[in-house]
Structures are given as structure tokens and as C-alpha cells.
Amino acid sequence: MKILWRISIPEDNQKELATTFSGKFGDDITCLEDAEQRFAEIQALGICIEGIHFHCGSGHNGSSSFDKAIKLAKLCMTVGRKYGHRMALLDLGGGFPQGDLPEPLVEILK
């Protein structure tokens, strides 16, 4: 079994979305210090995290916070590795803009 840590992604434009998830699911991580604290707690429990999962809200034009979600997930994966977690999997759940991903997002994913 592989365990993913689900992070919450607050939406910038909630009224434009069909569904918002940030108030229902995920851990509220807003900065590096939050991530450091959570991974220290997870490490103390003896749990090994394999990666990060998030699900942005869904709407016709995608999530307004998709790029923020990718950046936060990348930060969490970097911190997780520092605490000995594998962090080899990023599960992107929803929030995709329609059409191709904008070039800045493609660069973040590299």
C-alpha cells in the first residue's frame, strides 16, 4: 500500500467553479513552516508518505489555482524528501484548464 498526503488548495475564484474542494478535503498547508511541521509529525508516527495528492475545484475553464497547487505540491515533495519520505508520486486531481496546459505550468512540472 502506498500512502499519499492530500493537501488542500484554496480557490482564488470559487464562484466560477462548479465544485470547490478546499473546504472539504485536504490538509491546509500555506507555507514552508506548515509543511515542515506536518512532515515532522508524520515521521514521528512512523508513516512513510509516497507522494502528494490534490484536487482543485472543477469549472469550465479549470481551476484558478492550478499553478498554485503545483507549486505547493512541489514544495511539499521537497520537504518530504528531507524527512526521509520517498515522494515519488504526484496525483493531480481535477482543476485542469481546458486545452493545453499553459507553458508556465509545464515548466513547473519539470
Image (cartoon, rainbow, N blue to C red):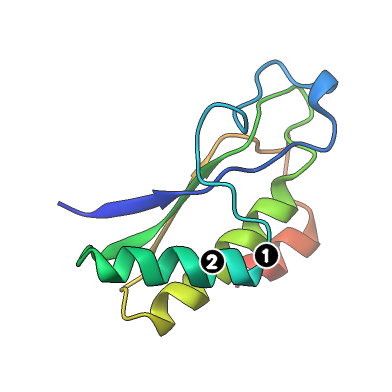
Residue 56 relative to residue 49: left or right? right
What residue is disc 1 on?
A: 31
Residue 64, placed above or below residue 61: below
Mark 1 residue element: loop
Where the C terminus falls, by quadrant?
A: bottom right
Amino acid type assigned to the residue bearing label 1 in the image: Cys
Q: Position of residue 100 (x, y in %)?
A: 72, 46
For the residue carrying disc 2, how many other residues have a C-alpha within 10 Å: few (<14), some (14-19), or many (20+)? many
- Which residue is depicted at the point 85% across and 31% down? 13
- Which residue is depicted at the point 50% across and 40% down? 26
Is the Cβ of the residue at disc 1 closer than 8 Å to that at disc 2? yes
Between the residue at mark 1 and the residue at mark 2, the CA separation in whole angstroms equals 7 Å
Looking at the picture, tell me which residue is in the foreground, 85 or 42.
42
Place residue 19 in its image quadrant. top right
Residue 97, placed above or below residue 7: above
Task: Farthest residue to the top: give it.
Answer: 18
Q: Position of residue 11 (x, y in %)?
A: 75, 36
Q: Position of residue 15 (x, y in %)?
A: 84, 19
What residue is disc 2 on?
A: 35
For the residue carrying disc 1, how many other residues have a C-alpha within 10 Å: few (<14), some (14-19), or many (20+)? few
